[in-house]
Amino acid sequence: MPERRVTVVSRVGLHARPASLFAEAAANLGHQVALTSESGQTVNAASILGVLSLGIGCGETVVLSAEGEGAEVALDALEALLNTDLDLA
């Protein structure tokens, strides 16, 4: 299963609007994607409640992992989102 370590750059982390945009993007990719926080908690990246429950802040490093054919492309898309200040999107 491919993985990607990414540092969250949104000023507010993955809270409210950024978490919603991230979870929606993950849901639309057609892959099972997991999001793991620095504390080791893992949730379904397509679950807004799961993403919010992690309390990920700006500057935290997370691990994205995806299953299936084309998983690297899915991870590329989600990495690009996390490398953007989603609070401004």
Image (spheres, helix red, strand yellow):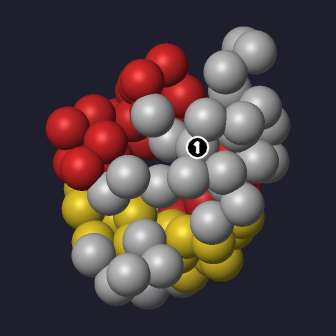
Residue 22 visible here: yes
SS for dot 1: loop
Task: Please indicate whether residue 64 sits to the left or right of residue 82 in the image.
Answer: left
Q: Give the image location of residue 49, x and y in percent.
A: 20, 38
Task: Please indicate whether residue 45 sits to the left or right of residue 12 in the image.
Answer: left
What residue does disc 1 label? 13
Q: Give the image location of residue 48, x and y in percent.
A: 27, 34
**Numbered circles on residues, count:** 1
Image: 88 above or below 22:
above
Image: 61 above or below 25:
below
Q: Give the image location of residue 75, x and y in percent.
A: 61, 59
Q: Give the image location of residue 67, x and y in percent.
A: 38, 71
Task: Please indicate whether residue 9 sits to the left or right of residue 57 in the image.
Answer: right
Q: Residue at x 35, y 65 (%)?
A: 34
Residue 79, quarter of picture: bottom right
In the rendered structure, which amino acid carries the disc numbered 1? Gly
Residue 54, quarter of picture: bottom left
Q: Residue at x 42, y 24 (%)?
A: 16
